[in-house]
Amino acid sequence: MAIDQVEFMQGLMQTNSLRERVLAHVRADMAQKKLPSGSDRLINHALTCGSLARGEAATISGYSDRQAREAVAALSNKGLLASNSPRGKQVRLNFSASLAEACFPELFAAGADESTEGP
């Protein structure tokens, strides 16, 4: 792969500000009560480490065990966390198709520009 291709994709993906975009999205959903408060702490941990043990969720979020399980479930339902099985001990960061535009806006903006150009 050529360096110019890597640089092009870095520009589209904007990896240097990915954390801020994902956390802003989660915090907006928290403000609208679509996600429980503390969800941003779980996502921040997943962004840093790639995954978290379900048993760590209470410590990371500051919630009781039950509230932490509910937060992990809400983030999973939203497509931000995923597991290999419904009761898997580990959940990992996930970017569902429904969140792709919010997380990678330049990737879709570039595609929109190309699709609107005439022949």
Image (tube, rainbow, N blue to C red):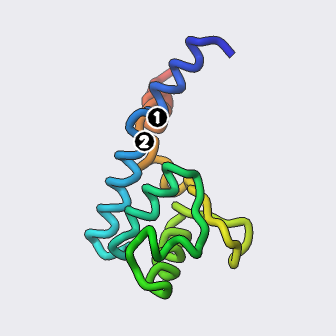
Q: CA distance from mark 1 to mark 2?
A: 5 Å
Q: Is residue 89 above or below residue 28?
A: below
Residue at x 50%, y 72% (from the top left corner) = 57
83, 44: nearer the viewer: 44
Q: Residue furthest right?
A: 85
Q: Name the residue tied to disc 1.
A: 15
Q: Which class describes the residues within 10 Å of circle 2: few (<14), some (14-19), or many (20+)?
A: some
Q: Quick one: SS at disc 1? A: helix
Of the 4 image quadrants, the one containing the N terminus is top right
Q: Quick one: SS at disc 2? A: helix
Residue at x 38%, y 37% (from the top left corner) = 17
Q: Is residue 45 above or below residue 75?
A: above
Q: Name the residue tied to disc 2.
A: 18
Task: Check if mark 1's residue and mark 2's residue have beta carbons within 8 Å.
Answer: yes
83, 12: nearer the viewer: 83
73, 11: nearer the viewer: 73
Task: Tell me where residue 26 sits by quadrant.
Answer: bottom left
Task: Tell me where residue 51 sits by quadrant.
Answer: bottom right
**Residue 68: x %, y % from top left:** 47, 79
**Residue 106: x %, y % from top left:** 42, 34
Task: Tell me where residue 52 sits by quadrant.
Answer: bottom right
Q: Amino acid at mark 2?
A: Leu
- What number of labels is visible? 2
Residue at x 56%, y 63% (from the top left corner) = 81
Q: Amino acid at mark 1?
A: Thr
